[in-house]
Amino acid sequence: MSLTARQEEEQNTYKRAGILGLPYIDTSSIQNKQIFKDILSKEDLYKYRVIPILADRYNISFGITNNTSQQTITYIRGQFIDQRLTFSLISDTGFSDYMKLYDPPKEVVYQDIDINKSVENIEPNDSVSKILNQINADDMLAYLVQQAHKLNASDIHIETQTAGVRIRFRIDGVLHPIAELSLDKYRILLSAIAIGGNISTSSDQAQQGHIAEKVKMADGRQVSINLRLETTPTINGMDAVMRLFNMRDDMFTLEKLGLSTDERKVLDDIIKKPSGLVLVVGPTGSGKTTTLYSILRSLSTPERKIITIEDPVEYQFPGITQISVASKNTNENNFAERLRAVLRLDPDVVMVGEIRDNDTAVTALQAALTGHLVLSTFHASSASAALARLQDIIGQNPLFISSIRLVMAQRLVRRLDENTKVKIDADAESIERIKKIIDTLPPEVEKPDLTNLKLYKPGTTESNPFGFSGQIAIREQFQMSGEILDLLKSNGASSIEGLEQAAINSGMKTMLQDGILKVIDGKTTLDEIYRVIG
C-alpha cells in the first residue's frame, strides 16, 4: 500500500473512532511492535479481529477493527476478569501488519504453468495445485490471471466436483486442466472473486459481474485483473467462468481479421454506406466482439459520432461513446430502451452489443431504416439461421428486410504453427471429402487444383507441444440482395435450408467451404474444421 493510501486509511479510522467514541491508535507509528502469544491464540486473533497492543500483569490494551463486534468485546472482557482492559480502534492494514508477526507468511515460489502434454492426456499440474492451496485469496486470483495471460488463454473455468475443484484454461479454443483445489480453499477463492465482481456467494441464481483491479502479489509482482465473470450454482457448489479482457489496440484492425479480398471488399462497401444493419453471428467465443470492434475502429473519425451499448464494455476506445448495460438491470434499463435513448443523441454509427429480444431487434432495424449504420451480434449457428430467426421476430416486413445490409457468421479454429507444421499426403477418404465440398462452391469462387494434394498436421516441440499458434476465423457472409432478397420478399417465412441455398446461389461460401479452403491452404487441419463445425 502506498504511503498516501495508508495515511488516508488512518485518517478515516481516526474519524470512525470519534464517531464510535473509542480511542484511536495509529499502529504505523509504532516502531517496535510487541507480540503476546500467551494472551490469545493465532486462530482467535483471526476469528475475533483483535490484537493485544500492550500488556502486563494487570493491564491489556487491545486494538480492534471496524469488523470487531460488540459481542466479541463482551466475550473478551469475560475471559480476562483479572486485568484492566482497554479497546482502541486500529485500521484494517494495521491489523494485517500485526497478524504478519503472529502468522508470518510462508515463502511461496510462483512457478510458471507449463502445458507440455497432449491435449487428450493432460492432467492438472501438481505443483500449481500446491501453490494455489498455499497462498491467500487475492494472490490466487492474481496468479491465475497472470498465468492465463502468459499462456494466451481466453477464459478461466472453475468447476466444482464431488471431491474438489478443477481449474481449466481455454487456450486457442480448447480447454486444458491446470490445477485442482480443495473445497475449503475454493471457498476462500470464491469469496475474493465475489467481492471483486460484486456478486453473492449464496445466490441460487446465475450471476454476472466484472472484476477490474490491480493486485500486488506476495512476491512483489503487480497484476492487472480485468475479467468478465459468469457464475452458476451446481449440485456441488458454485461454478465460475472468467473471460479475460487481454486485448490490445493493435488487435482491432480490419487487416487482422483475416478477411479474403472478396470478403474485405464487401465489408468495405457496406460500412461506407450511412445506414443499414450489419450482423455478426456465432456462439460465445467465436470472435464476434473483435470483429465489431475492428469495424468500429475503422469507422472512427472526427466527423462521425459513434455510440456503443454493451454488456459489459470489454475495451475502451478514444473518440467513441460507450455505454454499459448491466445484465442484472435489464428489466429496468434493457438494450431496447437504451438504444431508443441513444438514437435521440444523433449518432451516425451505433453498436448494440447483442440483439437479445424482439424489442431490441425491431428498434435496431428501425434505426437502420432512419439513417443510422447499426452494428450488432446475434447468437445463431449460421448466417441463414440468424436471418430465419430474425424473420420470425420481425415478421413479414419488406422495409425491415431491406434495411439488413450484411450478415456475417464465423467460428474460430486453431491455426497451425508455421514453424512446426508437417506436410503429409492426403489419404483417399480425405480427398473424397474435400472434393465433395469443393464441388459445391459457388461459380464465382475459383476452385483449387486437388491434384497431388498435400495437407498438414501439427508438429510437436517442447515449446509448442500442440503444434498450433493462435486462431483464425472461418466465415460465411451474404448481402441482402439478389436471390435471397427476392425469396424473402415473395415467400414470407423461409426455411434455413431455403435461405442458405438462395445465399449460395447468390455467391456465398459456407463456413465449411471456407474452412476446407483454409485446410488446402495449409492454415489448419481437417480435424480442426470438423471439431468446430461438425
Image: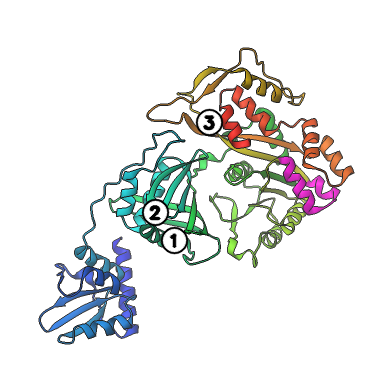
Q: What type is the residue that disc 1 sits on?
A: Gly
Predominant SS along the magenta part = helix
Residue at horizontal 32 percent and vertical 83 percent from the top: 70
Dot 2 corresponds to which residue? 141
Q: What type is the residue that disc 2 sits on?
A: Leu
Q: Is residue 471 located in the magenta-colored stretch of the structure?
A: no
Q: Is residue 499 left or right of residue 88?
A: right
Q: Are marks 2 and 1 in contact (CB under 8 Å)?
A: yes
Q: Quadrant of the N terminus?
A: bottom left
Task: State which tag comes first along the sequence, 1 or 3.
Answer: 1
The magenta segment: 383-403
- Residue 415's label in the rendered image is 3
341 in relation to 45, above or below? above
Dot 1 corresponds to which residue? 196
> Alpha-carbon neighbours of circle 1 within 10 Å: few (<14), some, or many (≥20)?
some
The way the protein has been coloured in the rendering is rainbow
- Residue 162's label in the rendered image is none
> Alpha-carbon neighbours of circle 2 within 10 Å: few (<14), some, or many (≥20)?
many
